[in-house]
Image (cartoon, grey):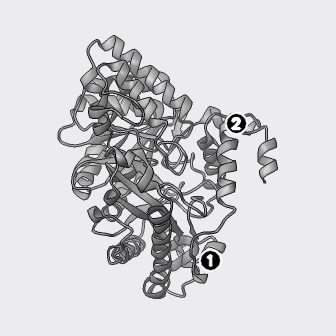
């Protein structure tokens, strides 16, 4: 595998370096695993999403960039920025030194608020912002990289949306935090941008702010995490596969799910233990020393996929009206499963989750990976089975309260909506009134599309189909999700 990676002509130099590093990390065993866990992992029911056998950095890191902009960085020899060029360059320098599971930053900050104080001449600021975004796309070659704007309208926010429409780049991913403070003007600009370049998504700011007691970031795919903290690890369960170990609904809820959840939580603790107690990250990294991160604001994530397949398997549901997304019985069982997992997690107190979270881990509706088959992302209705949009929203919304660290649905709109973005804003407002947490959209004519939580270009996937190299490793994942999970075949919403 090492020599094969070295000789490959289908991946870039940077992709080879990352792959070789992962192979080295995977060559040792330092974590304690129970025999039951090993069996679940061998059977593909539990997985650690390729985090490696010796984790040496948290999976998701959410620096407090406001502190950086106020004080600069002694470690990086950067003074506090004084103009738009210094601000964008300082951020780009810092991003290079923010690690994650991908080796690249998964969170870039509320970039409109960070840049707004430096907007003087709008033409100059627009040029700086365009170059800033192009630099990110060309150097952070992984579209799990995520920036935020909002909820307040800013000049910088409007310019960022305009630049993203013009550039049509998949990186960075973008979310607008939407609240009562958000003007219709910037919300409409956001929708216009999303119909061209599949971003931004809309986050229900009121719900996230309540869950995280103030400032939060939307990172990676759509993960909500505390600013100044993050997540040490994410371990997930494939519920569809797990359901096949149960002989009834009751057996699944009272025996199979609790037993499996115990193994997952203990493994989250073990991975977190190694990072906290042995890797040296929290003792040595300058982000900690300069106050951009605090250990007590980190937690672990308990992820799951395949709720729909789990429910349908347990009920033996084959007809549409019996299945998850349509049947009241199926939807009720789905909620019971998610609520059961949530209660198990809340009751699991651990020293490896920070005081901020009450020493508990968080439930995460995971978006899946490129090799998943017969497992829909998180709580989503399987692709191709989606009901009409309003029924879809009403069905989906009740699940969102249980997943503070991330859950969302994706809606593909017909190109005709480009002339009526106000109609989509009305849909989003209605969805958030039902307490939906996160709403993503794009147009059927976009080149940039949302795969599960991340973005890829369809034209770049076509290069892969021809055996050509591509800049971003997430394009490779997107091709797998297209081929294995029909991720680009979602129901089209027409006016």
Residue marked by disc 2: 12
Q: Secondary structure at mark 2?
A: loop
The residue under the point 49% across, 46% down is: 99
Q: Secondary structure at mark 1?
A: helix
The residue under the point 52% across, 31% down is: 137
Residue 396 image-quadrant placement: bottom left
Q: Residue furthest left?
A: 180
Image quarter (top left, top right, bottom left or bottom right) of the N terminus: bottom right
| Mark 1 surroundings: few (<14), some (14-19) or many (≥20) residues within 10 A | some
| Mark 2 surroundings: few (<14), some (14-19) or many (≥20) residues within 10 A | some
Residue marked by disc 1: 38
Image quarter (top left, top right, bottom left or bottom right) of the C terminus: top left
Residue 57 visible at all: yes
Q: Is residue 202 above or below residue 42?
A: above
Residue 128 in percent (x, y) is at: 40, 18
Residue 216 in percent (x, y) is at: 30, 49
Query: Distance of mark 2 from mark 1, alpha carbons?
Result: 33 Å
Please tell me which of labels 2 and 1 falls first in the chain: 2
Total numbered badges shown on the rendered structure? 2
The residue under the point 50% across, 84% down is: 256
* Left or right: 37 in relation to 469: left
Q: Is residue 320 above or below residue 426?
A: below
Q: Nearer the viewer, residue 73 or 197?
A: 73
Q: Nearer the viewer, residue 282 or 388?
A: 282
């Amino acid at each position: 595998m090492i020599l094969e990676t070295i000789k490959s002509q289908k991946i870039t130099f940077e992709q080879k370096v990352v792959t070789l590093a992962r192979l080295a990390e995977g060559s040792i065993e330092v974590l304690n695993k129970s025999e039951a866990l090993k069996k679940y992992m061998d059977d593909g029911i539990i997985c650690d999403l390729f985090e490696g056998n010796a984790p040496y950095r948290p999976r998701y890191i959410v620096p407090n960039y406001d502190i950086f902009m106020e004080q600069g960085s002694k470690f990086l020899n950067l003074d506090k920025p004084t103009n738009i060029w210094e601000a964008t360059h300082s951020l780009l320098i810092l991003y290079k030194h923010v690690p994650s599971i991908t080796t690249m930053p998964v969170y870039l900050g509320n970039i409109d608020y960070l840049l707004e104080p430096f907007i003087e001449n709008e033409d100059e600021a627009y040029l700086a912002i365009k170059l800033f975004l192009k630099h990110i796309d060309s150097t952070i070659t992984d579209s799990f990289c995520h920036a935020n704007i909002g909820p307040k309208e800013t000049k910088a926010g409007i310019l960022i949306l305009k630049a993203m429409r013009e550039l049509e780049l998949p990186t960075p991913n973008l979310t607008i935090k939407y609240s009562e403070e958000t003007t219709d003007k910037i919300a409409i600009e956001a929708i216009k941008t999303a119909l061209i370049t599949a971003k931004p998504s809309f986050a229900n700011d009121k719900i996230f702010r309540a869950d995280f007691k103030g400032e939060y970031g939307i990172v990676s795919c759509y993960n909500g995490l505390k600013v100044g903290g993050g997540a040490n690890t994410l371990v997930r369960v494939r519920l569809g596969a797990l359901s096949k170990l149960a002989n009834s609904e009751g057996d699944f809820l009272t025996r199979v799910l609790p037993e499996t959840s115990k193994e997952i939580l203990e493994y989250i603790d073990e991975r977190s233990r190694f990072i906290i107690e042995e890797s040296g990250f929290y003792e040595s990294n300058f982000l900690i020393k300069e106050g951009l991160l605090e250990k007590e604001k980190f937690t672990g994530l308990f992820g799951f996929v395949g709720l729909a397949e789990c429910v349908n398997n347990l009920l033996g549901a084959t007809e549409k009206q019996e299945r998850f997304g349509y049947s009241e019985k199926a939807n009720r069982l789905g909620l019971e499963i998610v609520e059961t997992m949530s209660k198990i997690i809340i009751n699991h107190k651990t020293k490896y989750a920070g005081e901020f979270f009450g020493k508990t881990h968080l439930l995460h509706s995971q978006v899946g990976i490129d090799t998943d088959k017969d497992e829909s992302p998180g709580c989503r209705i399987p692709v191709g089975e989606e009901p009409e949009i309003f029924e879809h929203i009403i069905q989906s919304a009740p699940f969102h309260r249980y997943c503070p660290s991330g859950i969302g649905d994706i809606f593909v709109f017909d190109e005709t909506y480009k002339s009526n973005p106000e109609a989509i804003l009305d849909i989003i407002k209605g969805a958030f009134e039902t307490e939906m947490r996160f709403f993503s959209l794009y147009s059927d004519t976009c080149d940039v599309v949302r795969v599960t939580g991340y973005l890829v270009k369809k034209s770049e996937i076509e290069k892969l189909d021809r055996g050509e190299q591509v800049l971003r490793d997430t394009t490779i994942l997107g091709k797998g999700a297209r081929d294995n999970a029909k991720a680009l075949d979602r129901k089209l919403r027409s006016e």
